[in-house]
Image (cartoon, rainbow, N blue to C red):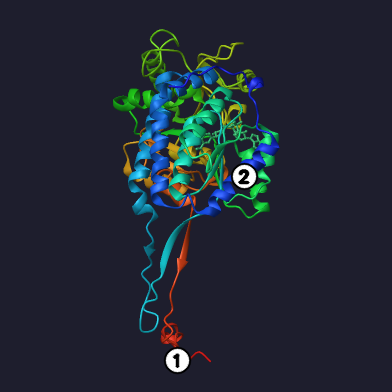
Amino acid sequence: DTKVTPIAPSDLTLSTTQEIDEVYARLSKTFESGVTRPLAYRRTQLLQLARMLQDNHTSFEDALLADLNKPRMETTVAEVAHLVTSALNAAENLEEWAAPTPCPTKEMWRSAWGATLHKEPKGVALIISPWNYPLVLTVNPLIGAIAAGCPVVLKPSELVPTFCELVSRLVSQYLDPAAYAVVKGAVPETTHALALRWAHIFYTGNSRVGRIVATAAGRHLTPVTLELGGKSPVVLAEDIGEAEMDVVARRVWFGKMQNAGQLCIAPDYAVVPRAKVDRFVEGLKKAHGEFFPDGEKGHPLTGEIPLSNIINPTHHARLVDLLRRTKGRVVFGGEIREDKSIGPTILTDVPVDDVLMEEEIFGPFLPIIPVDSIDEAIQVLNSKPSPLVIYLFTNQDDLKYKFLERTKSGQLVLNDTIMQLVAHEMPFGGQGESGYGMWFGKATFDLFTHSRGSITVPFSEEQFFEGSMQNLNISVARP
Ligand code: NAD
């Protein structure tokens, strides 16, 4: 493990614009040399990355504890462990992913033309990541880019300075510095980087900055992946009864408490049949008692340390302001704390146009909206921009299809929250306001890969239009 010294946001040494230009030039040269193309090279880098994570998992825990007060177990389970698997999985499947794929085409004249898609690395890529899950959101896209054969500049969030410094040090130590580098930057440095011509930009963060990134990329026609956020709702169907209610509440509260609600797929609000609201709240309170038997001094998984902090005073003030302005009825928590933490809070009778329903909450508050029918629940969902995910709790299979047809979101998850992260093989991504481009596993490899089609037309075949004109009974020879 590498020794970690906590760094305050104001003490982070940022990259200069000259350094950014130098890194860009170095990586571009590396790409042109073809060094990153051979599968053996890519595999070595992926294994090195897995080693970096294994050797330093305690250091990553230390860094996220310093920056976010993130419980150690949360870092290990939600960030490090999954990444090691992801890197090893990419190394193992590389050959298959990168193999040229034949495109079965109709015989054009006397022979097929060997139509094939060749999997080519796009070129030097930029990955910009946020503070909330800084390791996974920096390294997981990197895995796909390495597997694809792309050199990469990583630009982690300046709001997690200790992590930023650590990852910068470790990447240069474990990976080939000619092909992979970390730029440490806030808005001015990122703006400078965004003006360069990248082969692909992978951005995770809020949708306001997503628009800035997409606009900058547009100047060079650079393809972009935008992993944004949104208000991911929970919907309880009428059929949820006494038998399921405690499990439902526990699963919702578990998803909400991760990183104190600062998770892109956290359940943002809950839409609940009016007659079931009280019982649902009772279940949530019970779950809270189970997760935090000693107030908030115990963590859901270890009972070890409290909830993550709210990332900074700006976000803390934003959450306090929401609590002050909401018209909802606080039925649990609600105390305003002036320190970095904020109390988990449940609110009922929240109007659809409440201040809590305007933007992604990104904190430990759960507003509950009472409804009288499932159609009314769908109306509430459809009055908001499409979120990353909709969490539907029901025993009725046909409701799943109703939601697939009548609502929009990146994903639809039934009867649990955040478990889509465990289904590594299922591509993940948003729709509309929650972003575009799918990733995870092979899907990430595909993002950084250009599938370049090729055909070989035999010299002997001249009347090549004949096939396509067959239906018209016309034969056309090349003039
Ligand atoms: P943030 O403030 O750390 O910003 C994200 C990145 O954008 C950082 O690297 C930052 O330096 C950069 N940035 C900020 N302002 C910029 C500007 N003006 N120009 C260029 N770059 C700029 O993180 P955040 O945006 O607060 O992250 C939280 C958001 O991310 C939430 O909306 C959350 O839902 C979303 N998110 C989405 C996913 C996903 O997978 N879809 C995952 C995690 C978080």
Please tell me whether mark 2 or mark 1 is closer to you in this view: 2
Question: Mark 1 — residue?
Answer: 475
Which amino acid type is marked by label 2?
Tyr
- Rendered residue at 39%/61% (across/down): 100
Q: CA distance from mark 2 to mark 1?
A: 54 Å
How many marks the image carries: the answer is 2
Q: Quadrant of the N terminus?
A: top left
* Quadrant of res 106: bottom left
In this picture, is 9 found above or below 202?
above
- Rendered residue at 56%/11% (across/down): 335
- Residue 2 position in % (x across, y down): 46, 22
The answer to whether marks 2 and 1 mark residues whose Cβ atoms lie closer than 8 Å is: no
In this picture, is 129 found above or below 429?
above
Q: 169 or 342, which is in the foreground?
A: 169
**Mark 2 vs mark 1: which is more N-terminal?**
2
Name the outermost residue toward the top.
Answer: 294
- Residue 215 position in % (x across, y down): 67, 48
Q: 199 or 134, which is in the foreground?
A: 199
Say what secondary structure mark 2 lies in: helix
Left or right: 405 as drawn, with respect to 127:
left
Q: Is residue 237 visible?
A: no
Which amino acid type is marked by label 1?
Ser
Residue 24 numbered tag: 2
Say what secondary structure mark 1 lies in: loop
Q: Is residue 68 visible?
A: yes
In this picture, is 366 found above or below 343?
below
